[in-house]
Structure formats: structure tokens, C-alpha cells
């Protein structure tokens, strides 16, 4: 069994976890468009590939899958997830399983207004959203919402271009500067993150790890503490199973006055997943079992509370003499 990790970048821990779990059962292969991506050097083999927007990119990935006899493939960056889901059949034809939810669901995750509509349809609490400033102003006049609010891209990741605004003037400036913006209710409460695994064979939610976020940096969890609540576990399980998610996903949640609100869903490993792994929530092992044709046991909430994660900086040093440096 060989697994391909696309766009590994700086996600060293994920590569290391898969190498540890696959052990002598197979190899972990990594790709990136830069040979200065430190995570690729933790893999058994590394391929330098074009940027995902380059013509022929998907053909290059398929070529690697054939050459390395890849059993399963997944990506660690948002822009590649839709591509992987859309081209699922091409991968299956050569014996490679894309570890990703179906294309329409992935697209819904990356369209914040579509996700809002889905959550409302499922009667799951979520912050109010408005697809344009005119609709927002109408709701403002009716007293349905008030400042402050978030103005953010309908599609986006890593918390880029998200602004908390306090007036109509600020709202107008942002809508003049950028296209495809929406307005979202400002959620002033405790934020949580959930690392979730949905079995690729049974469709059952088999793992949920919840962390209370203590500090954020550049859209990722910097410090967090493990947390358990059966009510939240039930809400997450019902949501992901009804939607039909598969594999690993990351969910952002707010708690306000005892009510949990789902904010966003990322259909990939979250940046804070190392916290879950350190607490025994082993998603790489779940992936490997599924690729071997085995269902995973349900172990929702099988971890200890009050275990703290604290991220810190690390560096990689490598002699690149004789190699062209691709930034």
C-alpha cells in the first residue's frame, strides 16, 4: 500500500504520522510545487510538480500514481480538493482512491453562503449570512442584525480578507475594494474546532475530537485544550452522516449561551490535527484501514479532556548544492 500526499508544504506532522502508521506496509510519497517545502523530506519519496493551475497538472499526478502504484491520495490545501474530487473517476480507473468527499459537497464547503443555506435547511444553528450588501442593509433596517459584522469572501481560506466592520462606511469601502463578498453575523462566543473522520466504506462517523481554541494565528489554531460534550458529538455525527462526508474533515464551531453554531467546514485535515493525534485520535490509521478494505470501529470522543496543545516554531536545514531552488 502506497499513499500520496499532495501539496505537503509545511505539514511535516501529517507526513510523519502516515509514515509511522503505515510502517512496513507501504510507502508515503509527497508532492509540492517547491523543493523548499520541508514536509516533503519526511516522505519516502518526493516529486516536484507544477503549480495546480498549470496545464497538465492532473495528468502529472495521475502519472505519479501509476508509477508509484498509489493506493490512496489526498491533498492538504483547499484549492486542490475540488480538483481531486472532480477527477475522482480518473484516479479510480488506475486503482487509486481519492480520500475526499464528493465534488458537490466539497464545493459547498468552499462556498460559505451555500454552506449557510445547507445548515439552515438541516435546522443546524449557524450565524446569519447575507449574499450581498443590499440584502444585509435590508436586514439591518428591520433590526434582524446589527454591527459589528464580518465581511468576507464567499469563497476563501486561511482567514484571508476577513474583516470585522462596525459601520456602513466600512462596509462600503470593502465592497468597493473586493468582489464576491458576503456579510456574516459576528459570532461573539467561545470557538471550538472539531477533527472528524467519516468511514469511507460504511459512511459512519467514527472519530470526533473537539478542542477549545485558546489562541489563533493566520487562521489556524495556535493553542487549544481538548474538550468533550456528548451533545456536541451527537450534533456533529448527525450533520456529517446526513451530508455524506467521507474521510477527514475539520469543522469550526462557536458556542454562545449554551448553543453550538457550526461556522465553517473544511473537507481536509485541519491545521490543528496534531492535537487530536497526540490525544490518540488516529486518522492516518483509519485511512489505512479503509484503503485495506476494512471498516473502522466507532470511537467518538475516545480521548482525555484538558490536554493542551501549544504550537511553536521549528526549522529544517538542508544542503541544496547542485539542485535548482524552486521557491
Image (cartoon, rainbow, N blue to C red):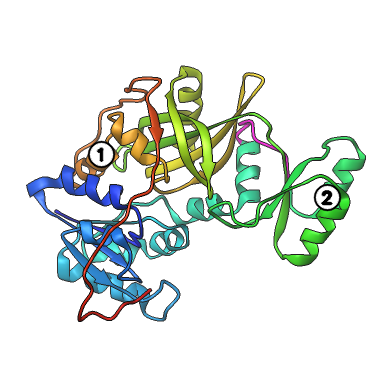
Q: Is residue 264 above or below residue 110?
A: above
User: In the picture, which quadrant includes the C terminus?
Assistant: bottom left
In the depicted structure, whether residue 188 falls above or below residue 201: above
**Which badge, 1 or 2, comes first in the chain's sequence?**
2
Label annotation for residue 46? none
Left or right of residue 279, residue 149 in this image? right
Specify the principal SS of the magenta part. Answer: loop
Q: Nearer the viewer, residue 253 or 177?
A: 177
Asked if residue 292 shows in the view, the reply is no
Residue identified by numbered label 1: 286
Numbered label attached to residue 135: 2
The x, y position of residue 9, in whole percent, is 35, 60
The residue sitting at 29% across, 66% down in the picture is 31
Residue 260 lies in quadrant = top right
For the point 45% across and 75% down, which residue is it?
53
Percent position (x, y) of residue 210? 44, 29
Instruction: Please state the extent of the stretch shown in magenta in the rendering.
Output: 122-129
Q: Secondary structure at mark 1?
A: helix
Q: Is 112 included in the stretch rendered in magenta?
A: no
* Residue 81 visible somewhere in the drawing: yes
Q: Position of residue 153 (x, y in %)?
A: 66, 57
Q: 273 or 103: which is nearer to us? A: 273
- Can you name the residue that lies furthest to the left here? 24
Amino acid at each position: 500500500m502506497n499513499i500520496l500526499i499532495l501539496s505537503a508544504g509545511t505539514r511535516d506532522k501529517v507526513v510523519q504520522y502516515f509514515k509511522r502508521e503505515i510502517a512496513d506496509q507501504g510507502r508515503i510519497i509527497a508532492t509540492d510545487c517547491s523543493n523548499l517545502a520541508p514536509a516533503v523530506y519526511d516522505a519516502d519519496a518526493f516529486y516536484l510538480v507544477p503549480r495546480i493551475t498549470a496545464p497538465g497538472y492532473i495528468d502529472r499526478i495521475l502519472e505519479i500514481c501509476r508509477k508509484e502504484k498509489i493506493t490512496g491520495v489526498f491533498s492538504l490545501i483547499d484549492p486542490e480538493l475540488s480538483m481531486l474530487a472532480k477527477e475522482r473517476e480518473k484516479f479510480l480507473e488506475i486503482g487509486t482512491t481519492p480520500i475526499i468527499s464528493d465534488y458537490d459537497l466539497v464545493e459547498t464547503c468552499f462556498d460559505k453562503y451555500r454552506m449557510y443555506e445547507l445548515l439552515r435547511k438541516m435546522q443546524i444553528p449557524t450565524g446569519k449570512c447575507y449574499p450581498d450588501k443590499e440584502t444585509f442593509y435590508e436586514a439591518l433596517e428591520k433590526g434582524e442584525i446589527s454591527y459589528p459584522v464580518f465581511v468576507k469572501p464567499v469563497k476563501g481560506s486561511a482567514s484571508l480578507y476577513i474583516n470585522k466592520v462596525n459601520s456602513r462606511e466600512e462596509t462600503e469601502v470593502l465592497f468597493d475594494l473586493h468582489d464576491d463578498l458576503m456579510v456574516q453575523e459576528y459570532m461573539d462566543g467561545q470557538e471550538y474546532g472539531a477533527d472528524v473522520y467519516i468511514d469511507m466504506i460504511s459512511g459512519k462517523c467514527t472519530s470526533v475530537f473537539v478542542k477549545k481554541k485558546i489562541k489563533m494565528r493566520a487562521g489556524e489554531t495556535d493553542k487549544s485544550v481538548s474538550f468533550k460534550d456528548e451533545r456536541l458529538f451527537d450534533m456533529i455525527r448527525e450533520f456529517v452522516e446526513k451530508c455524506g462526508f467521507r474521510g477527514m474533515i475539520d469543522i469550526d464551531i462557536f458556542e454562545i449561551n449554551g448553543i453550538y453554531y457550526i461556522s465553517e467546514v473544511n473537507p481536509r485535515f485541519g491545521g490543528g490535527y496534531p492535537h487530536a493525534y497526540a490525544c490518540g485520535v488516529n486518522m492516518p490509521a483509519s485511512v489505512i484501514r479503509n484503503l485495506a478494505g476494512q471498516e473502522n470501529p466507532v470511537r467518538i470522543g475516545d480521548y482525555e479532556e484538558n490536554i493542551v496543545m501549544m504550537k511553536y516554531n521549528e526549522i529544517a536545514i538542508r544542503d541544496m548544492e547542485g539542485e535548482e531552488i524552486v521557491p
